Image: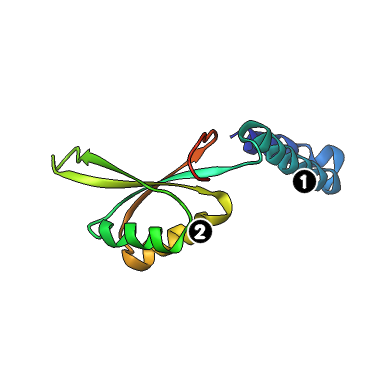
Amino acid sequence: MLLATDVIVSLFNIPVSGVEAFILAVFALAITGLVMNYVETGFDRKKAVYIMSPQLATIKQQVRDETPHGLTVQRVVGGFSDESKEMLMVVVEQANFRHLIDLVHAIDPNAFILTMAATEVHGGSI
């Protein structure tokens, strides 16, 4: 939101400073946004990926076989269905995130996947 506001302010500055100044301002804003993100979350970025699927057993086995990541199975209850189910949690490094998502979608294209930034991960095998 802050980046969008800054770009709009810079856009209104075009008649005063010109297009070249606008392009430089947008470039500087993008760099500033990236730096702020890394300062906020650190360079060792990881994601917590939560997976729910009717084919969870197959997904668990594939994650164990094809990735070096540990996994945690959590028992959950559906808010609407009141059904008891299992949910898989895997913490992956940013570089391995896409591979995990592709692996899950290859097994179940309709799997429910929730991803969150894990800014602090302590212990475990990562």
Q: Nearer the viewer, mark 2 or mark 1?
A: 2
**Crowd band around label 2 with a 10 angstrom C-alpha radius: few (<14), some (14–19), many (20+):** few
> In the image, is 120 to the left or to the right of 76?
right
Report if residue 31 is visible in the image: yes
Name the residue nearer the viewer: 33 or 55. Answer: 55
Q: Position of residue 14 (x, y in %)?
A: 79, 42
* Amino acid type assigned to the residue bearing label 2 in the image: Arg
Name the residue nearer the viewer: 29 or 101. Answer: 101
- Residue placed under numbered mark 2 in the picture: 98
- Is the N terminus in the top left, top right, bottom left or bottom right quadrant? top right
Name the residue nearer the viewer: 108 or 120. Answer: 120
> In the image, is 76 to the left or to the right of 114?
left
* Amino acid type assigned to the residue bearing label 1 in the image: Phe
Q: Residue furthest left?
A: 82
Gap in angstroms between the C-alphas marked 2 and 1:
27 Å
> In the image, is 115 to the left or to the right of 7?
left
Q: Position of residue 35 (x, y in %)?
A: 72, 38
* Position of 79 relative to 88 (above/below): above
Report if residue 8 is visible in the image: no
**Crowd band around label 1 with a 10 angstrom C-alpha radius: few (<14), some (14–19), many (20+):** few
**What coloring was used for the rendering?**
rainbow
* Position of 126 relative to 109 (above/below): above
- Residue placed under numbered mark 1 in the picture: 27
